[in-house]
Image: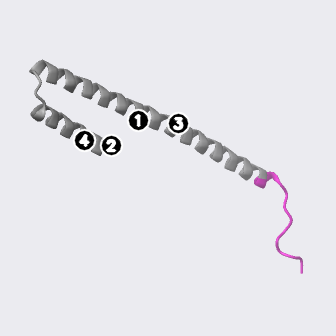
Amino acid sequence: MGNFFLGLGTGLICGVLFAPKSGSEVRHDIRRKADQGAGYVKGRVDALGSQASHLIERGKEAASEIVGRGRTAMTTPTTSAIPPM
């Protein structure tokens, strides 16, 4: 993500230095690029949030299954592992 912002900044600087545009056109271009960058970041944050929620749910399900297995193991009678002498 750091590379994205580095590229965004480099592109803005190059655009300002080399583009023969008026100040208002340059400001409009900067605003448009900033909006695009903000949209990209928002999309990535939303996607990461969704992935995190999914992983949390999977973790809860796995923990619940392990607890259930433990309860079953504690209540199920077992035979002795040591043979009688």
Q: Are marks 1 and 2 in contact (CB under 8 Å)?
A: yes
Residue 33: quarter of image: top left
Residue 63: x and y in percent read 63, 46
User: What numbered label is drawn on residue 1?
Assistant: 2
Please, what is the three-letter code of the amino acid marked with disc 3?
A: Ser
Q: Which residue is tagged 4?
A: 7
Label 2 crowd (10 A; few <14 / some 14-19 / many >=20) = few
Q: Are marks 4 and 1 in contact (CB under 8 Å)?
A: no
Rounded to the nearest whole Å, what is the CA distance between mark 1 and mark 3?
A: 14 Å
Q: Mark 1 or mark 2: which comes first in sequence?
A: 2
Label 4 crowd (10 A; few <14 / some 14-19 / many >=20) = few
Q: Taking 80 as reference, is 70 above or below it?
A: above
Q: Which residue is tagged 3?
A: 53
Rounded to the nearest whole Å, what is the CA distance between mark 2 and mark 3?
A: 21 Å
Q: Mark 4 or mark 2: which comes first in sequence?
A: 2
- Secondary structure under tag 2 reads loop
Q: Nearer the viewer, mark 4 or mark 2?
A: 4
Label 1 crowd (10 A; few <14 / some 14-19 / many >=20) = few
Residue 67: x and y in percent read 68, 48
Label 3 crowd (10 A; few <14 / some 14-19 / many >=20) = few
Q: Mark 3 or mark 4: which comes first in sequence?
A: 4
Q: Mark 4 or mark 1: which comes first in sequence?
A: 4
Q: Mark 2 or mark 3: which comes first in sequence?
A: 2
